Amino acid sequence: MRILLILMLACAAFGAHQLWQKREAARAAAFDATVFVAVEMPSGMQRNTVFVLAPPNCPSDQAKRAEALIRDLGNAGIPVKRESGIAFDVANPTPEQMRDIDRAISVFKRGAPVVYVNGLAMSNPSTEQTIAAYRGSGGTSHRALIE
């Protein structure tokens, strides 16, 4: 009888684990990677400045795209700053802040360059998409899709 109980508990735990994994995968894929999404801004990033996250002194294609984006934004007169990492300094975060932090990290994991601007983020955006988000006309938020 104990063996049956232990076996049932093990099956239930395995099933719960599988369900959790599917839920997390669906949540990570729930937003469209081709638009800026609402996120919790990492610490030290002020409004009205575009932050481009990419590895410094790197010859990769990602770094080259970051350099081109930074150059294009500068030529357009948009304040831009390059960063190589992010951190969140949130004491006692609310559930909404935690979701927004998770979303910011999900965008970051999609690959460089990652752009953060005015509460929005996107991986590998075009110059036009970044300018639209900066000016407030392209900041489509998919917050409702992943909550």
Image (cartoon, rainbow, N blue to C red):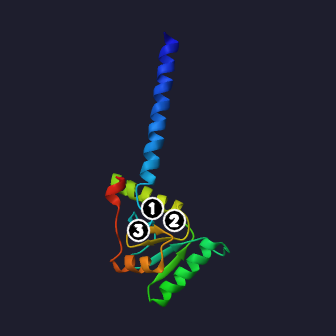
**Residue 133 horizontal/vertical position (percent):** 38, 76
N-term-proximal mark, 2 vs 1 = 2
Cα gap from disc 2 to disc 1, whole angstroms: 10 Å
Q: Secondary structure at mark 1?
A: helix
Crowd around label 2: few <14 · some 14–19 · many ≥20 (10 Å): some
Residues at marks 2 and 1 touching, judged by CB atoms closer than 8 Å: yes
**Residue 132 horizontal/vertical position (percent):** 38, 79
Looking at the picture, which amino acid does disc 1 mark?
Answer: Ala
Q: Secondary structure at mark 2?
A: loop
Disc 1 target residue = 104
Looking at the picture, which amino acid does disc 2 mark?
Answer: Ile
Q: Which residue shows up at 42% across the image and 76% down it?
A: 129
Q: Which residue shows up at 44% across the image and 85% down it?
A: 78
Q: Which residue, as the protein is rendered here, is positioned at the far top? A: 1
**Residue 99 horizontal/vertical position (percent):** 38, 54
> Relative to residue 137, is residue 28 depicted above or below?
above
